[in-house]
Amino acid sequence: MIDDKYEPLTIQSLPQRLKTISELTALVGTDTNSWKVEEVGDGNLNLVFIVKSPAGSAIVKQALPYVRLVGDSWPLPLYRAYFEYHALTRQASRAKGTVPKIYYFNNDQAMIIMEYLAPHKILREKLILGEKVENLTDTLGEFCANTAFRGSDLSLDTAEVKSDRALFSGNVAIPAITEGLVFCDPYFDAEMNSHTPGLEPVIKILRNDIDMKSRVQHFFRLYSAQQDTMCHGDLHSGSIMCTSSESKVIDPEFVTYAPFGFDLGMLFANFFMAFFSQPEHRTKDLETYQSWILGVVSGTWSSFEKEFTKLWNTERTGMLYPKTMFENQGHSSGKALQHLLNDIWRNSLGFCGIEMHRRCLSLAHNADFERIEDAKRRAPLEARNLMMGRELILNSEKITNTASLLKLAHKFNRENFL
Ligand code: SR1
Ligand code: MG
């Protein structure tokens, strides 16, 4: 039996410590001499090991008691693994086939053993390399719609929603990272902030824009108080793994009950950052690839809308918008649905703009921009991204469809703000 006392795994200790876990040996066999262990965690928080043998493979993910990116000066509770595990099991049943298979969870060791996705690559890397992924929009739109709808009062029995809200409200320290780094730090001179030299004129515009900062806080209030559904909480292109035609969503340790549009907004932002960074990643087929990325934004929304509408018509069994008030009286609920979808769309744009700011201004920047070594070439692209983020935050109510959103992206892509 694996020990009760938490101890971080190492490449060396892993085989000895985990050799009695039958769920692992069922995957990689009992002969630990044949196990090859690699540590591949490239995220900001955790240890991630690949265990391979001639018999098979597995991922062992273990939380560290601090933020890996920063070090032990920033302690972080191990309990996030518990919430990640519970999020993954819910996502697996609500959005079938979209998350890795989970084989084992150990609370004392803050450790999850799951499917090794191969030959999948992190989507962000594919976007930097200019690779396309078939069916990406369907998977992402359906993932967002299924998890949003089926985790909410539109679908679940209210007792179950309340119990899940209570469960995930225990995930305090991890969403607190989002509360600080995303919703506040970009807008003042926070300790862990950094930015590309040359961006100062744009940062000044953002930090002096009281209307925009008020809107940011409006969206922060929604994030904190509008507990519509169980959100992934950190749905960026580093939380998606793909082959050329299959995509899986990973890493929901930021899970929290939040507004329906939160995950979509984070996702859109990361596609826009991929879009704006492209001129420094390629010259050949630049416009074609940028258009493909924008097509992912509009396609994801269309697929979300379609799937959400299907669920609305077939699985609306929760306490909200009851059929007794609409269909059972011969009344269409179409207008109510449209109103809700409009609300989700507008909120997603606000969250999107804020995420576009934080990835260039606070802690944990995106490789899309960070891989551009020459700061003089990076700054103007980040400036376009920051200014479009501002536009989305200020005018989310006025951008009513995907065509207008993409037009805006093209417009900002032509601008020079520095
Ligand atoms: C200190 S953690 C920084 C970022 O890494 C995670 O992936 C989240 O995006 C978080 O904001
Ligand atoms: Mg992560």
Image (spheres, rainbow, N blue to C red):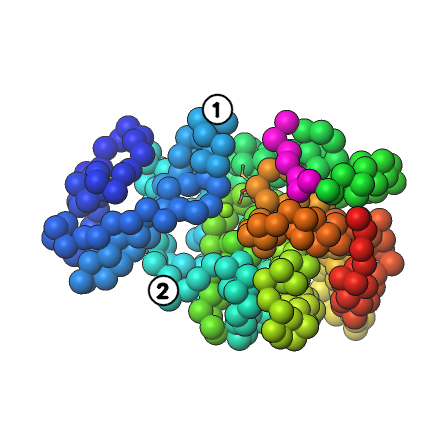
Stretch in magenta: 191-197
Which residue does the numbered mark 1 point to in the structure image?
73
x 29%, y 49%: residue = 38
Using the rendered view, name the quadrant where residue 182 is placed.
Answer: top right
Relative height, residue 40 to residue 342 (above, below): above
Crowd tier of the residue under label 2, counting other residues whose Cα lies within 10 Å: few below 14, some 14–19, many 20 or above: few
Which residue does the numbered mark 2 point to in the structure image?
118
x 68%, y 48%: residue = 376
Callout 1, which amino acid?
A: Ser
Callout 2, which amino acid?
A: Ala
Nearer to me, 300 or 356: 356
User: Which comes before the other along the chain, label 2 or label 1?
Assistant: 1
x 57%, y 50%: residue = 373
Task: Please indicate, yes or no, whether residue 207 appears anywhere in the rendered image.
Answer: yes
Crowd tier of the residue under label 1, counting other residues whose Cα lies within 10 Å: few below 14, some 14–19, many 20 or above: few
Residue 364 in the figure: left or right of residue 76:
right
x then y, percent, for residue 296: 64, 69
Relative height, residue 61 to residue 342 (above, below): above
Q: Which mark is residue 145?
A: none
x then y, percent, for residue 99: 45, 59
Using the rendered view, name the quadrant where residue 310 is placed.
Answer: bottom right
x then y, percent, for residue 162: 59, 43
- Describe the element under mark 2 as helix, strand or loop: loop
Relative height, residue 410 to residue 269 (above, below): below
Relative height, residue 35 to residue 254 (above, below): below
- Describe the element under mark 1 as helix, strand or loop: strand
Predominant secondary structure, magenta span: loop
